[in-house]
Amino acid sequence: MDLIINIILLIGLLSLSSHAFSNEKNEISNHDFTAAAYVSVASIDTKFVRPAFLRGIRNSDAMASDDEYYDFDLLVIGAGSGGIASARRAASYGASVAVVEMGRLGGTCVNVGCVPKKVMYNTASISHILQDMHHYGFSGYESGAVQFDWGYIQQSRDAYVERLNKIYDTNLSNSGVRQLIGVASLARGSDGNVEVIVSPLENGSTNSTQQQERYRAKHILIATGGYPTIPEGDESIVKHSISSDEFFELQSLPKRVVVVGAGYIAVELAGILQALGSDTSLVVRKEKALRNFDEILSEALDTEMQRQGINIYRNTMGVGRIELNEKDGLKNVFLNSGEVIKDVDVVIMAAGRRPLVENLGLQNVGVKQREGGYILVDEYQNTNVDNVYGVGDVCGNVELTPMAIAAGRRLADRLFSAKPEHSAVKVSYDNVPTVVFSHPPIGTIGLTEAEAVEKYGEDKIKVYRSKFSNLYFGVFDVEPSEKPKTFMKMVCAGENELVVGLHVIGMGADEMLQGFAVGIKMGATKADFDSCIAIHPTAAEEFVTLFPWGLSSQETGAQISPLNGNPAPEPRT
């Protein structure tokens, strides 16, 4: 009789699971999710059955062998891109996982970084197109018929970010990852093992843990990311400026703005604001912005920013002080060079970022840090403390969201997968492609020309360059010299002309680089690029037709050569 009752209960439970999944899928289908997000969000609730697409081969050695001794197999501090990626991948192997977060899910990228920045970049790009539309026969811009509403895009942008926060929440839940809301710090337990202390948030949030709790995990991952810094100096700088994060809190478009910094964040914000109508000044400490990028990129961007009307203050050695006029609320910015920028609405400090580690208690457990406060990790993301790891901006290796995601997933693979190929798996920090969403955008991967010369010697490298106006500007009735230019550079090394660096600035650079990066990661040579037939008319085709075309050493980096008309490779069966 008991067996029959248990069977009936099991059938009812499975029926309930199916019904819950059906309702959830129908509800979610009405929302504007990407395909990837939809697959995750529409997963079967883990209270009933772990989603099949999340299932992995469990490494039992990595799991907590004593449930009373460990609260979790993996405890992640920081629910940004890297932390969430690692947590969900670990949970897919059956690990017990929790994430501690004191802010909004998604970290810098989702909330005050990549995502809202790209929305504003798109907004600025539309402004550029509207300014150009008369070249294509459209009218109305000069008459004032076209208006820009900062409040509208701000509201739409923030609503989109909030939707992403909710998707992250749903995905963590569906993956079986427990969320601990509070402030995390590390401490040694009575037996000497590292523990994580989670304290309540000071804002009194009802979602926060209500009392201090201590947790033990077999593995602890630190993925707390970073935060913008204000350069040290006169206290008026902090008082009368905002950070790059606070740019997203602006309630209106400033009439006159100063952006301080020479990195990618500074040039991105300056380009956005100038395109939308602000009188924009860029303050750099030395000669120009993006000094660590290949010279062809930094020089071209400098020229284009000036063409667009951005005022560049060079060799300033930074801001000395900021004075506020109490009557009109405008500011005067005093530079260390002696120059003064008067009557400024907003001063944005975008001069750098630091790892968010101050309150983690790293010193309590002996986690080593390097210059700048970054957590010291090896190639496998291990810190010097057993079973404590770090990924993402907090380590300061390659501070990019996709890099943190890859590192976090590979760490989880190594710790929790039972697949032999995962036993020593790690992420590569070599040849990482990146894009600067300046106006125009920049795409770059590998070594700069100067770095290649230093590494291989000047006689061992060969450089290919191209400069042209995008076809978009072809119909513009202006002098050719006034048309914006696209610049490309390919840096090759060795007799086989291995491509060790690829750099581009111009319209479409942000979208064209990803595919070329795959080839470079696989060891493509100049001959491999030449062997690929161009897609015409595009800007990207220039990379596979760089002069002189087809005359390089006929050596390939591919396992199966694509040169000389060879057939395409076939999959191994």
Image (cartoon, rainbow, N blue to C red):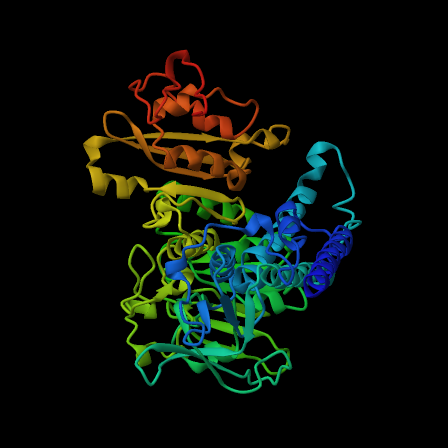
In the rendered image of this protein, does residue 479 appear above or below residue 185? above
Asked where in the image residue 326 lies, by quadrant, the reply is bottom right
Q: Residue farthest to the front?
A: 1
In the rendered image of this protein, does residue 133 appear above or below residue 553? below
Residue at left 28%, top 19%? 553
Residue 489: horizontal and vertical position, in percent?
39, 34
Q: Observer-nearest residue: 66 or 165?
A: 66
Residue at left 54%, top 39%? 511
Does the image show residue 266?
no
In the rendered view of the protein, which quadrant contains the C terminus? top left
Residue 131: horizontal and vertical position, in percent?
67, 44
Q: Observer-nearest residue: 519 or 337?
A: 519
Residue 555: horizontal and vertical position, in percent?
30, 21
Residue at left 56%, top 70%? 179
Asked where in the image residue 299 lies, by quadrant, the reply is top left
In the figure, is residue 191 to the left or right of 470? Answer: left
In the rendered view of the protein, which quadrant contains the N terminus? bottom right
